[in-house]
Image (cartoon, rainbow, N blue to C red):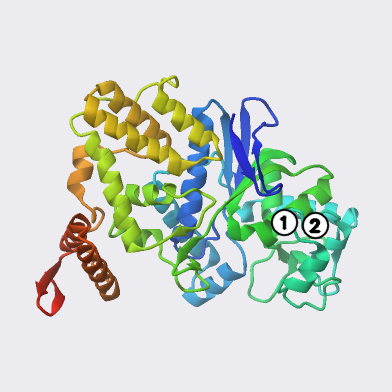
Amino acid sequence: MLKIYNSLTRAKEEFIPLVPGEVKLYVCGMTVYDFCHLGHGRVLVVFDMVVRWLQSIGYNVTYVRNITDIDDKIIKRAQEMNESIETLTNRFIKAMHEDANALGTVKPNFEPCATHHVGEMITLIRKLIEKDCAYVADNGDVFFSVHHFPGYGKLSGKSLSDLRAGERVEIDHHKRDPLDFVLWKSGKPGEPYWQSPWGNGRPGWHIECSSMSGHFLGNHFDIHGGGQDLQFPHHENEIAQSEGANEETYVNYWMHNGFVRVDNEKMSKSLGNFFTVREILKNFQAEVIRFFILRAHYRSPLNYSLEHLISAKNALDRLYTALKGYETVNAGKINWDNHHAQSFKIAMNDDFNTPEAIAILFNLSSEINRSQKPQDASLLKSLANILGLLQQEPQRYLQQGLVANNKNEKFSESEINLLINQRLEAKKNQDFKEADQIRSLLAEAGIILEDNSQGTTWRRQ
């Protein structure tokens, strides 16, 4: 049986869908004011993997992933770029789809934009006001009253007193309580607005997902996912809004993927330490990035470095090498009685344990090298395809090398120096295979290394 780690209960639980054979899944998507960084890419790949596995074990999945196309950051960026909000958001929605397609993700069944569901948000806010869970402030903003929702804090595991003492909350004298959060923002000059019973304005961020998930999946559904950074306050606020309005359980299983980290800090735009998916795609094949993401358990931190990406490439090469000579062998129906397939299924049913599942792929690749049996190659392709891996012809993949997408793009000076240092460290440890891989990587990008008695220098071709 499939078990999922439920962030709400902080335990692995047997997955029992509300409707037998069906799964309703909602994932918080992107706020489209910039290109997707690797943290966004992880969300795309992780929940794509979840959908693929659920489908492979027989579930009919309804997958909804929203797009936030109106908020403070979007308005600010449009003003900075001197373009309309619609032009800005359409451009970055297109870019997001390009990145998602490159990473091999399946399209959600529904991908609603917030601006298309404002009417439903107004209806939900009105309902909260009627139930005394929300109030209209004297400046025209509408706030949710956390005091009137006894379960507030159950997802984060914090009490109201703990939150008031420990959380940094924006000071707003219009609120009755510092923890109250905005449902509707009154209109400001130069900003887009919609008409509402409380005057012209626009919705707050949190109310979007409660409204859109309810529209497509109903008031109570199976799984809600997103990045770990959304657990509080966004998902906590979603629970309060939805359960406060509908007086029933909102979601049965909450899933949160871990952060992508750079130098032990979370990768984020606010910290300025982010790498966009398309930047990484300049130097690494898309399937390498997907493999790199899935090689870590979805709840664990994912440590980004060029060295780790090179390691992922080397590992993926081994799987493709095992399939050389089996180009005519196709993925087929999986015999789950096979011991490799059984082990793979056990791993994936254990909270989507992709590191263990990938280890089983390597065991199977070793068996292919020994047995030379086409049925083993077919099984390897079939199991890997569930993870969205081994999607290319082996010979073509192996010939492409590392820099497959745009060989005219060059590494930055800091990246070159980092790779040179990693190569020197590899040679010091007598890991000559990795040292050669790094030299080849740089050569493919047009960077020539020259070793001498003083060390290593480099030049562009």
Distance between the Cα atoms at labels 2 and 1? Answer: 7 Å
Q: State the quadrant of the N terminus.
A: top right
Q: Which mark is on residue 152?
A: 2
Q: In this orientation, which residue lies closer to the viewer: 166 or 118?
A: 166
Residue 126 seen in render? yes
Which structural element holds mark 2? Answer: loop
Q: Amino acid at mark 1?
A: Glu
The percent position of residue 379, horizontal first and vertical second, equals 34, 26
Q: Quadrant of residue 364?
A: top left
Q: Position of residue 387 (x, y in %)?
A: 42, 38
Give the residue displayed 45% in from the left and 22% down from the top.
336
In the picture, measured across the screen, residue 89 lies left or right of residue 239, that is left
Q: Is residue 179 visible?
A: no
Q: Residue at x 46, y 42 (%)?
A: 354
User: Callout 1: few (<14), some (14-19), or many (20+) C-alpha neighbours within 10 Å?
Assistant: many
N-terminal label among 2 and 1: 2
Q: Element under label 1?
A: helix
Residue that mark 1 sits on: 236
Which residue is painted at 64% across and 71% down in the image?
191
User: In the rendered image, which quarter is residue 58 located in?
Assistant: top right
